[in-house]
Amino acid sequence: MPAPNLFLVYVREAEAATEFYRSLFDIEPVFTSPRYVAFEVAPGVLFALWTGRSDHATAGTPRTSEVGLMVPGSASAVDEVFAQWKAKGVTVLESPHDDVFGRTFVVADPDGNLIRVSPVD
């Protein structure tokens, strides 16, 4: 059976969201259109932004999933990413803390989508 290879995040404004994720993850899109932007995050795996369901991208919509970034190294590597992102002005929802899987924190993109940083499993 094939593995998932496309991860969509609903956004209100593709251009603003593209700039946010381009800056945050230091990556460039591989496909851009007015309503859909895709970043290749691994060979054959896309992380995409889509305005087709922007009615779901509101502050009042509960978030039940997260975009995850696992960083190699110790807890200090997670803290270093936090310091870099905080300097970029991200919205911090959970400051760095230790959890069952190690050091972690959560920020939100401009549409309220959750982004968690944690150590590599």
Image (spheres, rainbow, N blue to C red):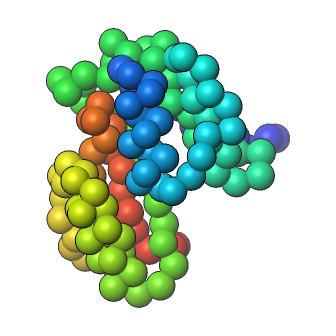
Q: Quick check: 4 left or right of 114?
A: right
Q: Quick check: 87 left or right of 48?
A: left
Q: Where is residue 44 in the image (x, y as percent from the top left)?
A: 77, 45
Q: Position of residue 59 (x, y in %)?
A: 20, 27
* Residue 89 vertical placement versus 48 (above, below): below
Q: For residue 94, say whether it is visible.
A: yes
Quarter of the picture containing the N terminus is top right
Q: Position of residue 73 (x, y in %)?
A: 47, 85
Q: Which of 21 and 78 is in front in this view?
A: 21
Image point (33%, 85%), residue name: 76
* Residue 54 vertical placement versus 37 (above, below): above
Image point (48%, 66%), residue name: 70
Q: Quick check: 75 left or right of 94?
A: right
Q: Where is residue 32 in the image (x, y as percent from the top left)?
A: 62, 27
* Residue 20 vertical placement versus 78 (above, below): above
Q: For residue 102, say whether it is visible.
A: no
